[in-house]
Amino acid sequence: MTPARPTAPIRPPRRVAVIGLGLIGGSLTRDLAAREIHVLGYDRDSATLRSAREAGHLRTALDASLKGLRDVDVVVLAVPVTAAPAVMEAALPHLSSTALITDVGSTKRAIVEAAERLEVAERFVGSHPLAGDHLSGWAASRSGLFHGARTYLCPTLHTTEETARLAEWLWTTVGAAPEWLSAAEHDRRLAWTSHLPQITATALALALDSAGITRADLGPGGRDTTRLAASSAEMWTAIARENRDNIAEAVAALEHRLRRFREALQGAETAEIHLHFLEGAAWAGR
């Protein structure tokens, strides 16, 4: 189900809460505060919470009870994908007046299922701004991160039109470009476009390490190719676990290509080797 494109204007929410003030949550906090929206926030790291307050971007700091979520219009769960369902459940007693509950994770099936199970499906839309980085934490967050960024919006089977309008408002307000698709299609697509590149960079880094090669030994191309290997292990372990079926399929396809390449090299098959490079260059040029 994809909600119809919003046609009627909405009254902008006055109070938005962001749970988790890392790269995505912190950047969203900065951008919303710059637009004079009252931002409430919580992070399990007290130093991060203090930094956000001292920087002037966070109007209200929440404590671990999340009781301060009462009277909040929008709640954004900016926590690891495996933690998001539990955080949503913990916040649930305080969300009776919340019009939109959303997340920012890189997988969507589990959180959409959790929204259905917790009976907040009408008020839930899964969000995924494609604005990630190998850096993480509040220190990596920055204003303008979402400008022009494609942001996938994944409804539940019961998402209301009002909730859909609020989700689009949230992301267009910070300059993102929303695109609707189902949770299942999101996870299938991201396995190829995001998760496979990450796993490839990590595997390449480990292969280089086994050969005694450090990142300092690489040229610009090698450093670009392995940049993602520096990404958060905690975050990517959660993503890989959540989307393991789709990722395994993508990894199998990569293994097939690598096996063919190895066989061509072992057989000194010049034409086949050239074809691999030729086809790769053709894809990159499209």
Image (cartoon, rainbow, N blue to C red):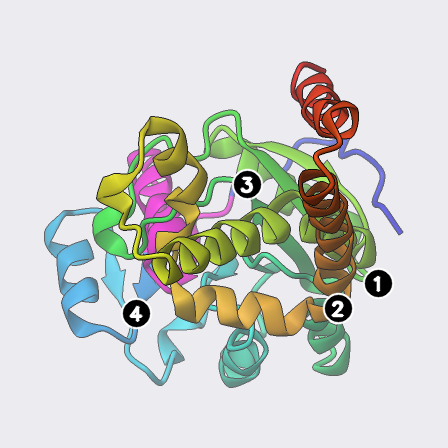
Going by the image, does 102 lie left or right of 257?
left
Q: Which badge, 2 or 1, comes first in the chain's sequence? A: 2
Rounded to the nearest whole Å, what is the CA distance between mark 1 and mark 4?
30 Å
Going by the image, does 201 lie left or right of 138?
right
Does the residue at mark 2 contact the one at mark 1 (Cβ under 8 Å)?
yes
Say few, some or many: other residues with alpha carbon within 10 Å of mark 2 (under 14 / 14 to 19 / 20 or more).
many
Query: Which percent across, then down, holds residue 126?
Result: 66, 57
Kind of residue sitting beneath label 1: His
Query: Which percent across, then down, holds residue 37?
Result: 36, 43
- Compared with 167, 245 (above or below) is below
Furthest-right residue in this view: 1
Residue 64 falls in image quadrant:
bottom left
Query: Which percent across, then down, holds residue 105?
Result: 56, 59
Kind of residue sitting beneath label 2: Ala
The residue tagged 4 is 43
In the foreground, 118 or 8: 118
Q: Is residue 61 magenta?
A: no
Q: Which badge, 4 or 3, comes first in the chain's sequence? A: 4
| Quadrant the C terminus occupies | top right
- Compared with 43, 230 (above or below) is above
The residue tagged 2 is 121
Say few, some or many: other residues with alpha carbon within 10 Å of mark 3 (under 14 / 14 to 19 / 20 or more).
many
Residue, x 53% and y 31% (percent of image)?
A: 149
Residue 144 falls in image quadrant:
top left
Q: Which badge, 4 or 2, comes first in the chain's sequence? A: 4
| Disc sitting over residue 158 in the figure | 1
